[in-house]
Amino acid sequence: MLVDSFKFLPRSFRPFYEGRGPFSGEENAVWAPFEKRLDESRIALLSSAGLYVKSTQPSFDLEHEQTHPDWGDPSWRAIPASARAAGIAVAHLHINDEDLLADPEIALPAHLLGRLANEGEIGGAVAEHVSVMGFQERTLSDWQSKTAPELAAHLRDQGADGLILAPV
Amino acid sequence: MMPSVAEERLAPRIVGVEFPFGHPFGMPRDRAMQRRTLELALHVLAGAARAGTRVDLDVEWPVPLREAYRSWQPKVPSPIVRRMLEARQAP
């Protein structure tokens, strides 16, 4: 089966995504070999669903996006692997959040990953996964200068050997 | 979600899923579907031999297309879509 990337996208949106090629300055593919065995590796998850822990973390800034439609909040949140669905909130203006709130595992399957660790399929899972809000300004300047380095440092601190990025 | 776009952007390892936006690992509470997706992602992570490796998940979304197409979309258009719609309607 070959996946149709545009099956669920409004037809008029397709030109915004298709045929644009790599970002400027990113014309060469990045490659890091995965040298450990999965059952010896600690894995992290990154979701772009705008998830946050509602009791301890601020929402992503949706008010600013309302008045600046080209802008998206470039900050990030550390999501504890032990977080329960009832404690997770969603801040993302571009998707219906009902299913995400009902079951955040559809975007950040932290409990499932923990089960795979218990079963020995992977070596372990990080204590804190990562959430960002996927709609970002086109230049990605904040991402390049601040968000991405912070995320890389966080994942190193967590001892992650590999990262699954899950765009929504 | 959009593996051909990830290929254009030169993502090193790609798992394609034909799921509606907002559901990268599958249906809510469908642990079998979520597990199948996550396990494929893990095996592509660890087993891909070269940059640009793409493997598509052979799972069909179990909801009629028209319903799935509607249900992932926000109830209120996002700010940028709202601006596009307003521009389209402007004289």
Image: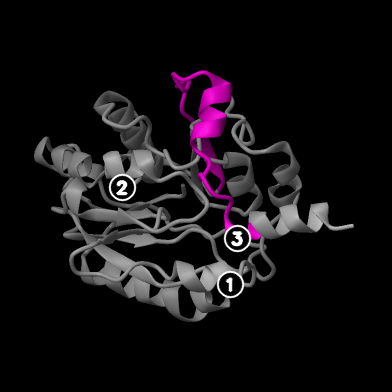
Residue A106 visible in the shown view: yes
Q: Quadrant of residue A100?
A: top left
Confirm or deny contact between disc 3 and disc 1 (CB under 8 A).
yes
Tell me the subunit letter for badge 2.
Answer: A
Q: Mark 1 points at which residue?
A: A67
Extent of the magenta region: B52-80
SS of the residue at dot 1?
A: helix
Q: How many numbered markers are drawn?
A: 3
Tell me the subunit letter for badge 1.
Answer: A
Q: Name the residue under label 2.
A: A108
**B56 shown above or below A26:** above
Q: Is residue B51 left or right of residue B62?
A: right
Q: Which is more toward the observer, A14 or A42?
A: A14
Q: Does the magenta stretch include residue A107?
A: no
Q: Residue at x 46, y 20 (%)?
A: B63
**A141 shown above or below A114:** below
Mark identifier at residue B79? 3
Residue A71 locus on image (x, y percent):
58, 70
Per the model, the C-alpha gap separating discs 1 and 2 is 29 Å
Residues packed near mark 1 inside 10 Å, few (<14), some (14 to 19) or many (20 plus) = few
Q: Which residue lies furthest to the front in this view?
A: B91
Please, what is the three-letter code of the amino acid marked with disc 3?
Pro
Q: Say yes or no: labels 1 and 2 on the same chain.
A: yes
SS of the residue at dot 3?
A: helix
Residue A61 locus on image (x, y percent):
43, 71
